[in-house]
Amino acid sequence: MSMEPGAPAPGADAAAPPFPSFREALAVWARVAALSFGGPAGQIAVMHRILVDEKRWISERRFLHALNYCMLLPGPEAQQLATYVGWLLHGAKGGLAAGLLFILPGVVAIMALSMIYAAFGHVSAVAALFFGLKAAVLAIVLQALARVASRALTNRLMVALAALSFVAIFFFRAPFPLIVAGAGVLGFAAARAGLAGPSAGHAAGASARPEGGYVLDDERGEGRGDPARARWVALLFAVLWAAPVAALVLALGPDDVFSRIALFFSKMAVVTFGGAYAALAYVAQQAVENYGWLAAGEMLDGLGMAETTPGPLIMVLQFVGFMAAWRDPGGLPPWVAGVAGGLIATWVTFTPCFLWIFLGAPYIEVLRGNRALAGALSAITAAVVGVILNLGLWFAIHVVFRQTRPVEGLGASFDAPVLSSVDPWALALSAAALWATFRLRLGMLTVLALCSAAGLALHLAGLVG
């Protein structure tokens, strides 16, 4: 992110701007949604530039405090951050408007791309485009890993947590929620005991001089509404989340594809801490290996779609739901089933995001500067580095190698690549994508476009199928 924690933000000493109207906020949230490419890091940077630097609606410290809470939550932190700030400004209607506008462009785009993929994904030219896209996605995931690691691995304890989480999830298939919970407890205890402190970004809310000149600063805007009202709003969203799931299970049975989509992604919404890339590690493991809804390569294709559209990266889950129902439509036409499956996955993924904010935000506002909470966050973020490394390695194996083989022993169980099955063109294209991303520092959309074009060129030259 392009922010310097603890440094005076532009306008910090100026008079606070007038409180924005709800209509003005809607226009800004629509602008944020239209610019929200690039995964969570890029999306948070866009919000910081617009909300903190340009509009001066929220101070640096209040912004980071909200971000810290959202990073502790399961689900997409960028969308939840937008909901939190919208709630601070205009209460429940502000949070709802900001959160919905943030995801709406992605919902429409991913649904359209899912239909195109289902219809034409096996056409050789389209497959060649996605062949190139996979290499770019691998580079983008590794870039995200480098960014998170540079912020999170601030001492030996954090490095050890990252290493342990990688070993646990890759070699021993440890449950992701267990990894996160263990890291959070350890970080909380270490911070309470004074053995380790949060990283600079997480601690920024507890340091530096008071900030002024913002609509929401250290003194102004203590939160919207009381806890009792927040509980009623949260109850409403809990019903909106649970009622459709219960209705599907009761009407269709737990083994129907729509019930399984609703139940799986509801579970995912509760346990996938650490942002989109961490969530994808869990989804890839379950949707590909356990449910068989799509292949590993198709999961990469879906991630490529999400990378090239505005909105949360976690919108790839809509693609997973679409493909699962499209392939098992029951008595429905496949297109109708696919759209229904995608919308069910989206509903149960994002409805809880509003629940977490509306329920927890009134309480979390009083915890600004709490070192124990920041310590737990730092430890969880360090553990997430190991989880994203697992995701990157999983992607690399399935991009570069055509075959894998199971390896078991000493309690470990993982898939190893068959070295003789290496795809030389995939390897070369992946290396080129990494060079463009890390050495040439080309933008994400540029790398995606170049790799897709390279995949098509290789197909036209008869070098890939």
Image: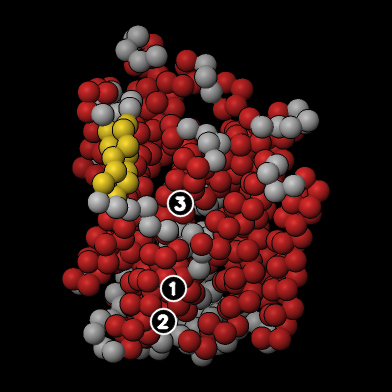
Tag 3 and tag 2, C-beta contact below 8 Å: no
Q: Secondary structure at mark 2?
A: helix
Give the spatial CA distance, label 3 vs label 2.
25 Å
Q: Nearer the viewer, residue 207 or 359?
A: 359
Residue drawn at point x = 35 percent, y = 9 percent = 462
Give the spatial CA distance, label 1 vs label 2.
9 Å
Q: Nearer the viewer, residue 219 or 182?
A: 182
Q: Nearer the viewer, residue 26 or 325?
A: 325
Residue assigned mark 2: 373
Which amino acid, by three-letter code, is at mark 1?
Asn
Which amino acid, by three-letter code, is at mark 3?
Tyr
Give the spatial CA distance, label 3 vs label 1.
22 Å
**Quadrant where the image shows the N terminus:** bottom left
Answer above or below: position of 14 versus 416: below
Residue assigned mark 1: 68
Q: Secondary structure at mark 3?
A: helix
Number of other residues with Cα within 10 Å of mark 1, as a class: few under 14, some 14 to 19, many 20 or more: many
Q: Measuring from the top left, give residue 54's x and y in whole percent.
A: 48, 66
- Which residue of the protein is positioned furthest toward the front in this rendering? 410
Residue drawn at point x = 22 percent, y = 28 percent = 419
Compared across the picture, whether 45 is left or right of 415 comes to right
Residue assigned mark 3: 282
